[in-house]
Amino acid sequence: MKKLVILFLILICFTSGNSYSKGRSPWNFSEDFENEKEGRLRTNKFTTNNKGTGRKPFKIRKDPDGNQYLEVTVKDGWNVDQKGREKETTERAEFQVKPKKALGKEIWISFKKRLPEDFTHIDDRVLFFQFKNTMHIDDGKNGPLIGLRYYENGNRLQIGGDTGGDAGRSISRKEERLHRIETKYKNYGGKYWFQKWKKYRNESKDRDVDGTASVTPLGKWSTYKIGIHNTKNDDGFVKVYKDGELMFDYNGVTYDWRGRYYQSHIRIGIYRDRVFGVSYPDQTIHFDDFIVVSDEKTLDQILAR
């Protein structure tokens, strides 16, 4: 999984001389964690979506073959957000690149993810990636444009998010119908994810779908590739590939929020729901080869190495 830094610099220099109809990503980097020392994450490239535990949940580990990766762990009671007395709470261990202005930009993201062999799923949401736009009036009520989430003890994979709404209040059912882009996959204990439906903005749920994707066994790496054109115009898009298989393909407006745009976030880690008074197991996910560039061609050339 080691990346040749020289190759990456050549590719970035090559693409920087080309013109694109869409704005270039404000982030351009490749992180394979090989220059980190084993132990707690030290790099200043990332910040944490911190609610109290700082970088404690983030450790640099090494496989027997010498490959280094980032281990992210959430424990019961770590980084809790209370949503109401004796109601649902959330726990998180997310890291992110420095938020930047990405409206009108094209962004291509890739990362490797591994669930350890002893990973325990829960019967609630476990989000492990999100791209989120925020507004000056944002107080956490607007959801991500795209998120990757497990539900139902890992047997359901939900891909999607919100393209707009009123950032000053929690999204209503009406706004959800108007702005949500989403698809659901189910796994019935076999080797494949089966797409059940998709919904793109004000359209009704389309159940005439036949998408499939391979299920990655515990202990094995999978590669996600995500393309986003973050725009108010109709030429926007969100695409999600897993191990080369296209699982999500939306084309249209991707930013339709009311409120003054502030910045965008790319977050990886664990962000899970929980029920008040119920103890949840520790969950650990491994991440590696985190890449963000401005176009699909550049990303594919890096991934081909």
Image (spheres, rainbow, N blue to C red):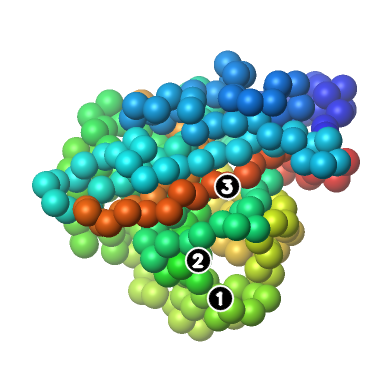
Q: Residues within 10 Å of mark 2 (few under 14, many from 20)?
A: some
Which residue is labeled 3 in the image?
285
* Residue nearest the observer in this picture, 30 or 78: 78
Q: Identify the residue at horizontal 68%, vertical 46% (top origin).
A: 112
> How far is mark 1 from mark 2, CA to CA?
8 Å
Which residue is labeled 2 in the image?
154
Residue 71 x, y percent position in the rendering: 60, 38
Q: Say which mark, if any, is on residue 187.
A: 1
Q: Identify the residue at horizontal 19%, vertical 38% (top origin).
A: 168
Residue 174 x, y percent position in the rendering: 21, 61
Establish if 276 lies above or below 93.
below
Establish if 5 lies above or below 124.
above
Residue 278 x, y percent position in the rendering: 27, 56
Instruction: Report the residue that reaches farthest toward the left.
Output: 85
- CB within 8 Å, label 1 to label 2: yes
Mark 3: amino acid: Ile
Residue 99 x, y percent position in the rendering: 47, 25
Q: Identify the residue at horizontal 75%, vertical 21% (top origin).
A: 35
Query: Residue 209 is drawn in which quadrant?
Result: bottom right
Secondary structure under the numbered disc 2 in the rendered image = helix
On-image quarter of the N terminus:
top right
